[in-house]
Image (cartoon, rainbow, N blue to C red):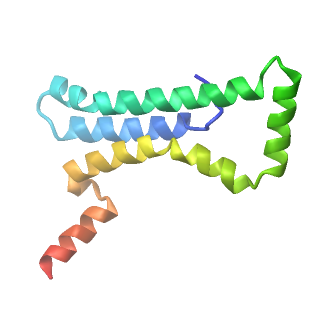
Amino acid sequence: QTPFLGQGASSALVDAFVCCARLAHSRDVRLALRAYDSEERRAGMKTMVQEARKWALISTSDRMFTRFSFRQACAWLPLRWIILDMMKQDKTNADFFLKVTMDFPECGHSSCSEDENEEDD
């Protein structure tokens, strides 16, 4: 893995939260860990790693033209474009986090509270 998308810490925090929430709400540790280790999470993380490798290979290429082009793009493209491309990869973390907060509304996700308030009206 590479640090080129800056997703390591974000992924670790989301994994820790989801794992803790699953363990706290299950009497069976094995079932809780199986729910945490889902195919969806694996697929999302695989995509994130592949995307980080793509950025790493481009920025550390042996080809001088590729490195030059990459550096020029980073220098001249609107930073927003680069950041938006990187943030697309955080959808994996956001979806994983949202799923556990929907499974356990008492974990305090704001959208859960909003949904409950709408039902009361």
Residue occupying image coordinates x 65% and y 49%? 83
The image quadrant of residue 37 is top left
Residue occupying image coordinates x 46% and y 34%? 12
The image quadrant of residue 71 is top right
Is residue 121 or residue 14 the one in the foreground?
A: 121
The reply, left or right, for residue 28 in relation to residue 109 is left
Is residue 27 or residue 112 the one in the foreground?
A: 112
The image quadrant of residue 6 is top right
**Is 110 placed above or below 59 here?**
below
Question: Residue 5's spot in the image, x, y percent?
Answer: 61, 37
Residue occupying image coordinates x 49% and y 44%? 90
Residue occupying image coordinates x 70% and y 23%? 57
**Quarter in which the C terminus is drawn:** bottom left
**Quarter in which the N terminus is drawn:** top right
The reply, left or right, for residue 115 in relation to residue 81 is left
Taking the view exactly as shown, the residue that stands out farthest to the top is: 62
Question: Residue 111's spot in the image, x, y percent?
Answer: 30, 64
Is residue 120 or residue 24 the one in the foreground?
A: 120
Question: Residue 119's spot in the image, x, y percent?
Answer: 14, 74
Question: Residue 81's spot in the image, x, y percent?
Answer: 67, 52
- How many numbered marks have been drawn onto this rendered protein structure? 0
